Image: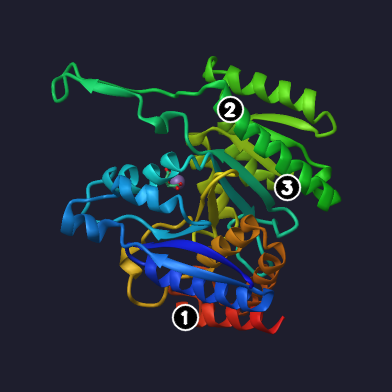
Amino acid sequence: MSKTYNIAVIPGDGTGPEVVAEGIKVLNAAAGKNGFALAYTEFDFGGSRYLKTGETLPDSAIAEFRKFDSMFLGAIGHPEVKPGILETGILLKIRFSLDQYINLRPVKLYPNVETPLKDKGPEHIDFVVVRENTGGIYTGHGGATRVGTPDEIATQLMVYDRRTVDRCLKYAFELKKKRNAGNPKYAAKPITLVHKRNVLTHCGDLWYRAFEEMGSASYPELKRDYNHVDAANMWFVKNPEWFDVAVTENLFGDIITDVGAMIQGGLGVAAGGNINPEGVSMFEPMGGSAPKYAGQKVINPMAAIGAAMMMLDTLGEPKAAQQIEAAMIAVMQKMKSQAAGQMGMSTTEVGDMVAGLVAKQ
Ligand code: IPM
Ligand code: MN
């Protein structure tokens, strides 16, 4: 009997369903090629369902997700829903409840993909951001009082405990070790902690000490570096070739990975994984629901295909993941642009071509 992976699929809103369909097409091609199978169960959570039923994501869904091998998400976001409801009610609820404590976001510029950075090519832009995904300001500690009066007060605390910091750092150090072993180009570069310890003297100090202690005790062979987050954003633009693995707390990771997405060719190609190394992970294209492009088959599915590739790699199918990447690279060469509406082909054609090349390898 061949192995079957059970995948929970949340196509979500806007262009989510269109890009997820292409991701699944490519997943199926890779499965057929590599002697495993994928069984999908679709869930209709998202803005449209919320508008109809008032429900974001019931606890029973979390219990169900736990039974899957992995999850594949399109996009959550609806122009008619007030910001914050779907984000906290669906996306963050899944990340927190399933303890997906790593948000892994590769920043890799593929050949023939346009970057807004002058004089930079694929040899300069090839790193990963390890974003802590369950702590920090995102925990929602704090509150508001005297709301609506001139004396209104609002707080939202950056919350970190040593265990949460350590487990994220351990993942990042292990990843760095693995990358170094596979490629001397990566081995020459440091693992970089990104924070703001010149101002955030408590949280920054916790992260910095934990980073130094773990690095010197368990990974002395790995070069370590530290950047303040504002400077890291600057170096991502000016000298992206300095980076290999950058590890950071939740909000800083959110912010710097949008810069990362842009320098690797935009949201049409940027993918990420919400990873629980001991549990159920969820993979998603980084672009949102892009409602203005929905239903036109002009959205770029490459980011969703990249997310599918990351999913297979995490499930323990690295060969299938490599085949997908090779096919993506070949198809990107044929596309006019990675921007929605400017690809020179439709969403479906991109997916068909990648799937076709995977099957041919
Ligand atoms: C992301 C998004 C989310 C985040 C939002 C939609 C809650 O920006 O995945 O980067 O802030 O993490
Ligand atoms: Mn973001």
Q: Where is residue 18 in the image (x, y as percent from the top left)?
A: 40, 72
Viewer-proximal residue among 30 and 353 = 30
> Mark 1 packing: few (<14 Cα in 10 Å), some, or many (20+)?
some
Q: Residue 241 carries which label?
A: 3
At label 3, counting other C-alpha atoms closer than 10 Å, the crowd grade (few under 14, some 14-19, many 20 or more) is some
Residue furthest out toward the left: 149
Residue at the spot of label 2: 165
Of 106 and 337, nearer the camera is 106
Question: Label 1 vs label 3: CA separation?
Answer: 34 Å
Q: What element carries label 1?
A: helix
What amino acid is labelled 2 in the image?
Val
Q: In which quarter of the image is the C terminus?
A: bottom right
Q: Which colour scheme is used?
A: rainbow
- Horizontal side of 288 relative to 56 (left or right) equals right
Looking at the image, is 52 positioned above or below residue 360?
above
The image position of residue 71, as x and y in percent, is 48, 57
Residue at the spot 74% in from the left edge and 42% down from the top edge: 176
Which numbered disc, 1 or 3, marks the residue closer to the eye?
1
What is the spatial separation of the Cα atoms under label 2 and label 3, in whole angstroms? 26 Å
Q: How far apart are marks 1 and 2 (CA)?
A: 41 Å
Amino acid at the residue labelled 1? Thr
Residue denoted by label 1: 348
Amino acid marked by disc 3: Glu
From the viewer's perspective, is 179 left or right of 21?
right
Percent x, y of residue 137: 42, 29
